C-alpha cells in the first residue's frame, strides 16, 4: 500500500519557553520557521499524492513553508492531544503533578483533567492514517507517497501501532520538531522505514519506474513477494 511520511511541525514559541501548548494557537518561532524551510528542501521533488494536516496553526505554517505548492486536507483526527487543564502550563510545574508519572510510565491509563485520554489520541490518529492510506492507495496506487503534518505524541502513537508496541511503550519513541518519520503499510504489516529523521534527502523513497518482466529466459524475479518485498530490504534501506 501507500507510504506515509509523518512530519512534526517546527519549533514553536511554547516549545522554546518550555510550555505545554496543547491546542492553543501558538505559532512557529524563528527557529521553527527555519526548520520548516530546511525540511522543505528535503521534501522538494517528492511527488506527493496527498498532503494532510492537523488543523492547528503551527502545522499549517510548517506546510506553507515546507511544501508551498500544496493544498493540505485538514483532518481533525491528527490534532494535538487535548491536555485540558494542563494546557498552557510549564513543563517544570507539570512534572510535580502525580499524573505526570502515569503519563510517563503507564500512558494507556492517562486521562488529562478536563481533556483527552492518550488511548483515545492513539485510536483516532491510527484511524486517520489508515483511512488516508486507503484513499491514496485506491486513487494513486501502491507506490504513492503522502505527507501528514502533525504533533509529537500523535506521531509516537502512530509509530507504536506500526511496530506492534503497547501504548505504554510509546514514550520510548522520539519525534523532534521538523523531523520525518516514514512508514510503509502493506496488506500484512507496516514497515518503519525511518524514525525521527532530521537529515538527508528522500530520493530513495521515490519508486523507480516499473519495467515489464522479460518473457524469454524465465519468469520475473519473485523475491519481492517473500518477506515483505521492498519494505523488508529493498529501496527502504537508506
Image: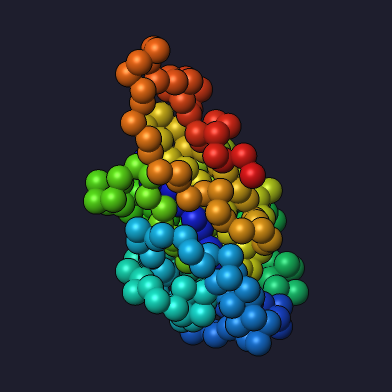
Residue 79 vs 49, above or below: the answer is below
Where is residue 143 drawn, in percent x and y?
38, 44
Q: Residue at x 35, y 15 (%)?
A: 216
Judge left or right: residue 55 versus residue 178: left
Residue found farthest to the front: 216
Q: Identify the residue at horizontal 56%, vertical 48% (top origin).
A: 204
Foreground of the two, 221 or 12 = 221
Where in the figure is residue 109, as x and y percent of width and height?
54, 49
* Residue 43 appearing in the image: yes
Tell whether 72 sits left or right of 29. Answer: left
Against 45, residue 168 (above or below) is: above
Q: In front here: 213 or 174?
A: 213
Quadrant location of the N terminus? top left
Q: Quadrant of the C terminus?
A: top right
Position in image of residue 86 (x %, y %): 58, 74
Q: Residue at x 37, y 50 (%)?
A: 144
Write the residue at 48% across / 50% down.
206
| Residue 238 shown left or right of residue 51 in the figure | right
Q: Residue furthest left?
A: 139
Amino acid at each position: 500500500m501507500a507510504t506515509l511520511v509523518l512530519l512534526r511541525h517546527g519549533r514553536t514559541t511554547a516549545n522554546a519557553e518550555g510550555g505545554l501548548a496543547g491546542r492553543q494557537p501558538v505559532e512557529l518561532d524563528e527557529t521553527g520557521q527555519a526548520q520548516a524551510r530546511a525540511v522543505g528542501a528535503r521534501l522538494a521533488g517528492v511527488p506527493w499524492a496527498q498532503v494532510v494536516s492537523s488543523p492547528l496553526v503551527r502545522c499549517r505554517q510548517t506546510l506553507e513553508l515546507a511544501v508551498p505548492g500544496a493544498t493540505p486536507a485538514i483532518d481533525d483526527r491528527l490534532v494535538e492531544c487535548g491536555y485540558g487543564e494542563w494546557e498552557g502550563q510549564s513543563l517544570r510545574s507539570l512534572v510535580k503533578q502525580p499524573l505526570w508519572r502515569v503519563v510517563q510510565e503507564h500512558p494507556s491509563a492517562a486521562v488529562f483533567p478536563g481533556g483527552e485520554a492518550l488511548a483515545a489520541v492513539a485510536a483516532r490518529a491510527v484511524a486517520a492514517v489508515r483511512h488516508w492510506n486507503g484513499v491514496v492507495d485506491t486513487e494513486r496506487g501502491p507506490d504513492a507517497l503522502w505527507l501528514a503534518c502533525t504533533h509529537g505524541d500523535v506521531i509516537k502513537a502512530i509509530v507504536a501501532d506500526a511496530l506492534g508496541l503497547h501504548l505504554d511503550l510509546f514514550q520510548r519513541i522520539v519525534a523532534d520538531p521538523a523531523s520525518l518519520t516514514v512508514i510503509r503499510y502493506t496488506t500484512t504489516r507496516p514497515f518503519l522505514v525511518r524514525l525521527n529523521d532530521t537529515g538527508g534527502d528522500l530520493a530513495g523513497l521515490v519508486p523507480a519506474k516499473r519495467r515489464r518482466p522479460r518473457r524469454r529466459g524465465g519468469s520475473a524475479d519473485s523475491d519481492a513477494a517473500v518477506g515483505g518485498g521492498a519494505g523488508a530490504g529493498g529501496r527502504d534501506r537508506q
